[in-house]
């Protein structure tokens, strides 16, 4: 399943680069025959860290437009993977879930940045718009990488809750 990402920013400690991409970009949600479910953004490019960079984080903006098509894709993905969706209702103000792993491969710097204690927070930022932020204690390791990306791993119940929340945002 693909969602449209209209903004991506990633800043990590000890890494002399930030990540960005020219919008729109596809955020894929998939699993490889079994959980965990993986949200992945690629390809990204490394840029110099902005001077105003305040803290380590990943920030994404998602467009859920056109709502009917995205709603159908959410339901089809949930059905295909036997993920129970909560009945439609008003979305809560902020949806928050711990991640199994938040990580980024930085091919240009041969770095792997990761957090096993990251938290994903999503909030509605406008009609059919969602802003997501991933925070956590990130670590960096030297590792050869072929592509610069961001990956977020979720357990099956968390994925079902995320799909239910997005579905409620669409209405």
Image (cartoon, rainbow, N blue to C red):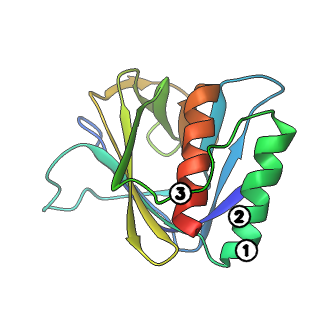
Total marks placed: 3
Q: Distance between the residues labelled 2 and 1?
A: 5 Å
* Residue at the spot 24% in from the left edge and 37% down from the top edge: 13
Q: Residue at x 13, y 62 (%)?
A: 52
Residue 35 falls in image quadrant: top right
Query: Which residue is nearer to you in this view: 167 or 14?
Result: 167
Establish if 48 lies above or below 99: below
What kind of element bears circle 2?
A: helix
Q: How crowded is mark 3: few (under 14 residues within 10 Å), some or many (20 or more)?
A: few
Disc 3 versus disc 2: distance between alpha carbons? 14 Å
Q: Mark 1 points at which residue?
A: 68
Specify which label sits upstream in the sequence, 3 or 2. 2
Counting from the top left corner in percent of width and height, residue 149 is at 55, 46
C-alpha gap between disc 1 and disc 3: 16 Å
User: Crowding near pointer 2: few (<14 within 10 Å), some, many (20+)?
Assistant: many
Q: Do the residues labelled 2 and 1 touch (CB within 8 Å)?
A: yes
The reply to whether discs 1 and 3 touch (Cβ–Cβ < 8 Å) is no
Q: Mark 3 points at which residue?
A: 89
> Where does label 2 land, which residue?
71
In the displayed structure, does residue 87 sit left or right of residue 83?
Answer: left
Q: Position of residue 17 (x, y in %)?
A: 33, 50
Q: Nearer the viewer, residue 55 or 96?
A: 96
Q: Is mark 3 on a helix, strand or loop?
A: loop
Left or right: 13, with 96 as reference point: left
Q: Which circle's residue, 1 or 3, is located before the other in the chain?
A: 1
Is label 1 or label 3 in front?
3
User: Which residue sits at x=58%, y=68%?
Assistant: 170
Relative to 103, does residue 8 appear above or below in the rendering?
below
- Camera sees residue 105: yes
Quarter of the image with the C terminus is bottom right
Which mark identifies residue 166? none
């Amino acid at each position: 399943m693909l969602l449209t990402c209209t903004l991506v920013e990633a800043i990590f400690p000890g890494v002399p680069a930030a990540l960005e991409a020219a919008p729109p970009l596809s955020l894929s949600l998939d699993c490889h025959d079994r959980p965990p479910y993986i949200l992945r953004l690629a390809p990204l490019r490394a840029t110099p860290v902005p001077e105003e960079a305040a803290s380590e984080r990943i920030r994404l903006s998602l467009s859920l437009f056109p709502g009917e098509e995205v709603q159908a894709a959410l339901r089809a993905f949930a059905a295909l993977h036997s993920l129970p969706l909560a009945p439609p209702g008003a979305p809560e103000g902020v949806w928050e879930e711990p991640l199994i792993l938040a990580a980024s491969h930085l091919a240009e710097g041969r770095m792997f940045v990761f957090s096993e204690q990251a938290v994903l927070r999503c909030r509605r930022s406008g009609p059919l718009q969602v802003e997501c932020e991933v925070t956590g204690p990130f670590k960096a390791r030297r590792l050869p990488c072929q592509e610069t990306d961001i990956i977020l791993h979720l357990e099956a119940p968390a994925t079902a809750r995320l799909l239910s929340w997005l579905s409620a945002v669409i209405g």
